[in-house]
């Protein structure tokens, strides 16, 4: 991001299909921070993975089975979870839902 951007409006950025039933769109970012929305159809999987970024996620809609470092918990709409740098994590959508994730630093691989 070369210019300073303070606001992001709905539908300003396009959705990217990641896998059947799984989409993503970057909402806003700086070099230090990034906000991303993920959409999941019921049963869609965010496969186990890890990255060096710190991640905090908010369940905007639906409910998810969330696994972080081998520990699994149900997180419903309105709930949140944090993934420290380097820990393996993933989700399963128990119903149609959306996650809003924040990463620090930004995920260059999403741009």
Image (cartoon, rainbow, N blue to C red):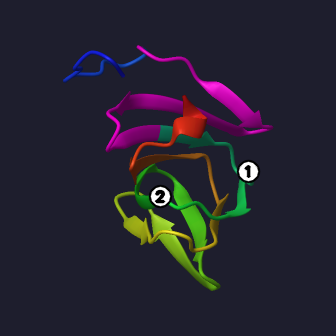
Classed neighbour count for the residue bearing mark 2: other residues with Cα under 10 Å, few (<14), some (14–19), many (≥20) = some
Residue 61 rendering spot, x and y as whole percentages: 46, 48
For residue 4, side relative to residue 1 (left or right): left
Span highlighted in magenta in the image: 12-36
Q: Nearer the viewer, residue 9 or 42?
A: 9
Q: Residue at x 41, y 14 (%)?
A: 12
Q: Which mark is residue 53?
A: 2
Q: Mark 1 sits on what residue?
A: 44
Magenta residue check for 24: yes
Magenta residue check for 102: no
Residue 50 rendering spot, x and y as whole percentages: 63, 64
Q: Based on the displayed image, in which of its 4 quarters is residue 16 positioned?
A: top right
For residue 2, side relative to residue 76 (left or right): left
Q: Residue at x 29, y 21 (%)?
A: 8
Q: Main secondary structure of the magenta part?
A: strand
Q: Which label sits in the foreground, 1 or 2?
A: 2
Earlier along the polypeptide chain: callout 1 or callout 2?
1
Work out whether 63 lies above or below 5: below
Q: Based on the displayed image, in which of its 4 quarters is residue 35 positioned?
A: top left
Q: Quadrant of the C terminus?
A: top right
Q: Which mark is residue 23?
A: none
Disc 1 to disc 2, how far (Cα)? 23 Å
For residue 111, side relative to residue 76 (left or right): right
């Amino acid at each position: 991001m070369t210019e300073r951007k303070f606001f992001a409006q709905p539908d300003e950025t396009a959705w990217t299909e990641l896998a059947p039933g799984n989409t993503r769109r970057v909402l806003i970012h700086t070099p230090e921070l990034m906000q991303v929305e993920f959409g999941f159809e019921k049963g869609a999987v965010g496969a186990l993975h890890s990255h060096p970024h710190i991640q905090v996620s908010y369940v905007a809609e639906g409910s998810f089975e969330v696994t972080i470092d081998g520990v699994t918990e149900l997180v419903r709409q309105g709930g949140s979870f944090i993934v420290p740098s380097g820990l393996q994590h993933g989700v399963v959508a128990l119903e149609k839902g959306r996650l809003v994730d924040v990463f620090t630093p930004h995920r260059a691989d999403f741009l």
